[in-house]
Image (cartoon, grey):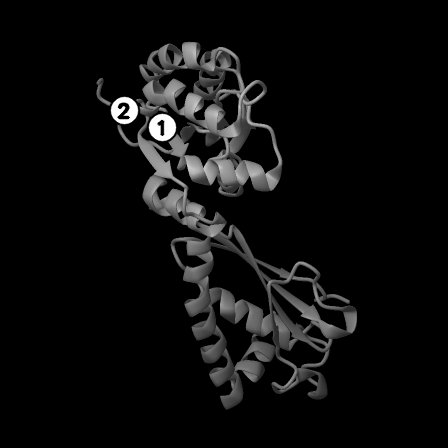
Amino acid sequence: MKAKPDRNDRFIIITGLSGSGKTAVIHYLEDLGYYCIDNIPAKLIRELVNLWLSKKVEMDKVALVMDIREPRFVQDFPGILEEVRKRYPIRLIFLEASDEALVKRYSETRRLHPLARNRSVLQAVRLERRQLEAIKKLANDVVDTSSLNLSGLKEIIGGKVLSKQLRRLQVVIISFGYKYGIPLDSDLVFDTRFLPNPFYIEDLRDLTGKSPRVRNFVLGGAETVEYVDRVSGFLDYLIPHFVKEGKSTLTISIGCTGGKHRSVVIAEKLKSCLKRPNLEIKIYHRDLFK
């Protein structure tokens, strides 16, 4: 067997047995920032690689799904893959599962196996397995999904197949005022209305949480110091689990009464507490000028 190309994660092809989880993987890769195409004919790989390498299109990372749904996939794919790998070390991920798992999945979803029009699902699964054996040998990674749920599959792809630097979580921190409603896309909501309120200090009322004076007032209280410490510690615990599960975006909403003072200060403070190499942090002050 020919040597496989060096590990590379910027151009990935997903293939394997029907029902093994290719759609779930391509959705996960899309969340990671890949430009994804499902069910592309093998003969188009050359043109797509040429276009991608030319940098004439904005596709930093590409992921393709191709499989036996294409009539000439088994015949055309091996030779085309060998050809394009001379230009770029494309990574091939092959997904498989046991006969029992695949038959059960098709029974539960009531979908038709691509090869099952004139045969049973089990016969189709076994035929496809034989036809794809040569392609399986070309893969950089073979993943058995028989006993994996969705989060387990994401963990395998994210942890054992993809480079660690790709496992980035986008954290969106939103400050808001409860009088205007909680942000609809919130994953976590923290209330700051019990903290000292600058609104009742005449010299601070017309300022915002962006002001150093307001910031010093809010952060100067002992309860604020403990609150920030407890919330940041809670997030330090949660975030690695969200990354492991495959979550791509985490929205943290910080609320006070009007969204102008306390929530803004705490949101900015949490942003500085959460700086990590694997986190992309964005912050929005929704109600700052209302």
Q: Are marks 2 and 1 in contact (CB under 8 Å)?
A: yes
How many numbered discs, if any? 2
**Amino acid carrying mark 2 in the image:** Pro
Residue drawn at x 41%, y 29% is 12
Location of residue 119 in the rendering, given as x and y in whole percent from the top left corner: 53, 21
* Local SS, label 2: loop
Q: Residue at x 37, y 27 (%)?
A: 92
Task: Identify residue for label 1.
Answer: 91
Using the image as rendered, state which of residue 14 and residue 182 is in the foreground.
14
Residue 108, picture quadrant: top right
Marks 2 and 1 sit apart, C-alpha to C-alpha, by 8 Å
Classify mark 2: residues with Cα within 10 Å, few (<14), some (14-19) or many (20+).
Answer: some
State the image coordinates of residue 159 (x, y, percent, origin top left): 35, 47
On the image, the x and y values in percent for residue 184 come to 70, 61
Residue appearing at x 26%, y 28% in the figure:
6
Q: Residue at x 51, y 71 (%)?
A: 269
Hey, what amino acid is under mark 1? Arg
Percent position of residue 72, x then y: 48, 10
Disc 1, SS: strand
Q: Which residue is mark 2?
A: 5
Q: Is residue 209 visible?
A: no
